[in-house]
Image: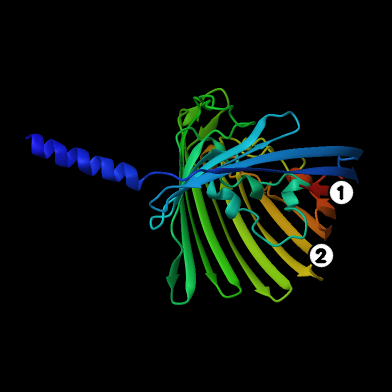
Amino acid sequence: MNNIKKIGLTALAGSLVTLGSHAGEMSVSGGINTVLKFGKGGGNTTRTIGSDRDVSFSGGGELDNGTTFSMTATTNDNHAISSSTTTITTPSFGSFSIGTDNGSASYMYDEEVPTAYEQVSDGKDTASNKVGDFMDNNSIMYTSPTLELLGASVTAHLGYSPQASDPASAPGDGAQVTYSESVGAGHEAGLTISYEGLKVGVYGAERDRTVPKVAAATGNYESDEFNGAWYAKYSMGPVTIGYSEFYLDAGVTSAISTSSTTTAKTRRSAGGLYTGDQMSIAFNVNDNMSISYTTSDETYDTQDDHKSGVTTDDDVTETIDAIQIAYSMGGMSIKAYNMEVTNANQDDDVADQSITEIALGFAF
C-alpha cells in the first residue's frame, strides 16, 4: 500500500512540474479619440464634440506543457471596466475564453462586412448589431483549433452563458451579473471557413425565457429567443467586398398588434421579427488610406396573432447608406463617415436623417 502511495505521489509531483508556469508579462495600451458629430432630421439634429479615452491592460504567461493564458481588461472614461476577458489556449484542443462585454462569439459574425472606419451600428443603432449580444454576461466560449480541409481553414465557436441578460455595463472585479427572472441561459455556435481570398461565417444564438408563455398584463406571447447571421467576404488585392444577412426573433409576439408603420419600434420589446442584409465594398488606396461604402436594409415584421382575427400590414424597412474614409500616420488617425438613414427605427413617417462624424485619434 505504501508503495502505491509513493507511486501516486511521484506521478502527482511529476504532473505539477509539467504544468509549471514561466514568468508572465504585462503591457498597457490605449487610445484617445476626439469626435465631432453632427446630424439633422428625424429628431436626430445634433452638433457636438466628444472625447473617448480607453486604456487596456493585457497580461499572460505560458505553462511548461505549452498551454498559454492571457487576460485583457479595458477601462472607459469613468475608470470602470468596460470589458474583460481571460483566455486559456491549449496546444492541441483549442482555447477557452471567459469574459464579459466582448467575451462572446457574436462579435465575429454580426455586421461582418468590410468598412474603412466603423460598423453602421456605431452611428445608428441597428437590430443586426444585437444578434447574440445577450451572450455578453460572463459567458464562456470555446474556440476549436483551425482545421485544414480540402485547402480550406475551418474554425468553430461554442458559447454558454448561465444568465444571458446582456448588462448595460460590465460586472465589477469578481462580481456576478444581476439575476433576471425573465431570461435564463444562453447558447451560441458559429462556424468560419476561409479559402484563399474568401471567408464565410454562419452563427446562431438562443436564450431561454423563464416568464409565462402568456403575460396577461400585456397580452403578449413570449417564448425562447433565437438570433442568427451569416456573411461572406472576398478580397482581391486592395478591394474587399462583403455581404451579410441576419434574423432576430426576440420571442415576443403581440396577441393583437398595436404597432403601426408610423411608430418607432423598440428592438427586442416590439412583438415582431427583424430581418435584414448589408452589402459593402472597401478599397485600400495605399498603406495609409482606405475608403468604403455600405448599404443596410432592416425590415420589421409585426407577426400578428392570426388567432385573434386581427391582422395588419405593418412591415417597414429601415435603410442606411454609409460612406467612410480613414487615413493613418503612425499612431495618429483621421476617420470620418456620412450616413443617410430612411425610416429610422422602422417608422416610415419620420424625416430622413443625415449623420456625419469626424474623429481624430491617437494610439499609444
Point out the tag, 1 or 2, that comes first from the N-terminus: 2
Q: Position of residue 350 (x, y in %)?
A: 83, 43
Eyeballing the image, is 171 above or below 187? above
Which residue occupies 54% across, 69% down?
194
Q: Position of residue 290 (x, y in %)?
A: 80, 65
Which residue occupies 44% across, 59% down?
145
Eyeballing the image, is 23 above or below 115? above
Eyeballing the image, is 230 above or below 35? below
Q: Which residue is mark 2?
A: 288
**Label 2 sits on what residue type?**
Asn
Which residue occupies 64% across, 58% down?
112
- Mark identifier at residue 340: none
Q: Viewer-proximal residue, 156 or 42?
A: 156
Eyeballing the image, is 66 above or below 176? below
Q: Quadrant of residue 114?
A: bottom right
Which residue occupies 78% across, 69% down?
284
Q: Position of residue 298 (x, y in %)?
A: 69, 53
Q: Which residue is mark 1?
A: 360
Q: Gap in Å between the C-alphas at discs 1 and 2?
A: 15 Å
Q: Viewer-proximal residue, 274 or 190?
A: 190
Residue 77: tell me if it is visible: yes
- Other residues around mark 1 within 10 Å, as few (<14) / some (14–19) / many (≥20): some
Q: Position of residue 195 (x, y in %)?
A: 54, 73
**Label 1 sits on what residue type?**
Leu
Determine the secondary structure under disc 2. loop
Residue 102: tell me if it is visible: no
- Other residues around mark 2 within 10 Å, as few (<14) / some (14–19) / many (≥20): few
* In the image: residue 1, left or right of residue 204: left
- Give the quadrant of the N terminus: top left
